[in-house]
Image (cartoon, helix red, strand yellow):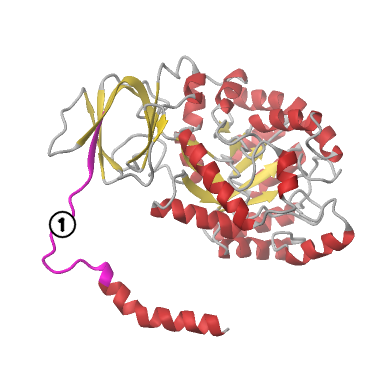
Amino acid sequence: MIRTIATALALAIAGPALAQSAAPAPGAAPVAAKVTYIHAGRLLDRPGQPPRGNSTIIVRDGRIAEVRDGFAAPEGGAALIDLKDRFVLPGLIDLHVHLLGIGGDPMRARLLALTNDDADDLLIGISNARVTIDAGFTTIRDPGDDPRSIRALRDAIERGDVAGPTIVNGGLMLSVTGGHGDGSNGVRADVAEMIIQKQEQVCDGAVDCARAVRRQIALGAQVIKFAATGGVLSNVSGGLGRAMTPEEMRAIVETAHGLGRKVAAHSHAADGTKAALIAGVDTIEHGSFLDDEAIRLFKEKGAWLVPTMLAPRAAVAQARGGALPPAVIPKAEEAAAAAFESHKKAIAAGVKIAFGTDTGVSKHGDNAQEFALMVKAGMKPADAIAAATVNAADALGRKGELGSIEPGKWADIIAVSGDPLSDVTRLESVEFVMRRGAVHKAGGKRQGFPPQ
């Protein structure tokens, strides 16, 4: 209480001074705009449309100012980046990444859980963020991590204190008691009791689930995620069937939408997916078991499928290798067997697809391996790239800022050798990365950060 009062007094006293310091001094010279010209040999400025030939992108103060045909000479002392021999396209967007903690090594993660706390996970998250942007992903949605830590990482990247992608953060995934997301699953009774007392994201009944949404938003969540069904990696043998009632799902969606947040539903079983779609969810994560009715509802509701094809492949390998609890093994095998065929069916039917990997199950930095799986499931390389740019931006509700290289949008730009429209695996080796006008990688090498 004393600290709270002291903080309030300090803010009250400092407020006028802060306001004055934010205003430019009378007669002060305007700060010169930072301008960069990028010469692109081939430019996919608007994924979904044919690429352009020789082009110049003009970046001013972190945003795209202009795109010209040909190689325009820099004016007024502007910097020049030469990518004449490279294929240039918008920064990639991954809608399902868990940045905090060890990724792709569940045995090590479980061992570290005995000694690590949120501070350790945040430091690991800083490293994961750097690896992620090195891979060409300039924006990610993190739909389930410690609320305070992921918010701190998000804000540090926004300030330019650390390198990483733009983060659209959820808080903790909402779950019913005993569902995928209840941290008390599978632990001894006395430990479970301590966990239960601290879990604010576990909810039962519509009213309680509305409360849980509001709590995660109060902690800084920009998107809400809930577990419509059981999950592969939760240490409980509850299967992958529907876990929440339609009333609970509807309460979550209506509350989140009323507070301006989009909603993602973790869902494997078709019954859970259909109930979530009827409730009005914006994206379905995984969608491992899809029937004709589920596909019809996707198209009727205009919802996005985020397939996360990397995740079941990684989970099966880890389960078979003994790195996951015994309760996980049959669920991993079942989901992996069904997911690929479900995704093929959805793609063929014209369901809207947005890119997401569930990285954190798989190794951070391997996100672009998802593209080859999408193409194997029936997508053209151009469509897979669109899923990770314009489509993902649309699914985030940020298509006015992200997803293409057009005037007014953030200068999130990557470059690769070769043609990813012919060989989508080219995106697994990104050579140049710019986020909001700052170069993070050039010539295949990580650049110093913050940039000088």
Mark 1, Cα crowd under 10 Å, few <14 / some 14-19 / many 20+, is few
Q: Residue at x 73, y 30 (%)?
A: 291
Residue 332 visible? The answer is yes
Q: 122 or 437: which is nearer to us?
A: 122
Q: 314 or 90: which is nearer to us?
A: 314
Please, is residue 58 above or below residue 205 in the view?
A: above
Q: Position of residue 181 (x, y in %)?
A: 73, 51
Residue 274 visible? The answer is no
**Left or right, residue 229 beside residue 35:** right
Main secondary structure type of the part rendered in magenta:
loop
Looking at the image, which residue sits at the far right?
189
**Left or right, residue 366 beside residue 14:** right
Looking at the image, which residue sits at the far top?
422
Does the magenta portion include 27?
Answer: yes
Bounds of the magenta segment? 21-38
Q: Position of residue 159 (x, y in %)?
A: 39, 55
Name the residue that disc number 1 marks: 30
Q: Residue at x 61, y 61 (%)?
A: 216
Looking at the rendering, in which quadrant would you find the C terminus?
top left
Q: Position of residue 345 (x, y in %)?
A: 66, 24
Q: Secondary structure at mark 1?
A: loop
Q: 134 or 173: which is nearer to us?
A: 134
Q: Position of residue 253 (x, y in %)?
A: 62, 54
Q: Residue at x 67, y 33 (%)?
A: 311
Does the magenta portion include 7?
Answer: no
Looking at the rendering, in which quadrant would you find the N terminus?
bottom right
Disc count in the image?
1
The amino acid sitting under disc 1 is Pro
Q: Quadrant of residue 432?
A: top left
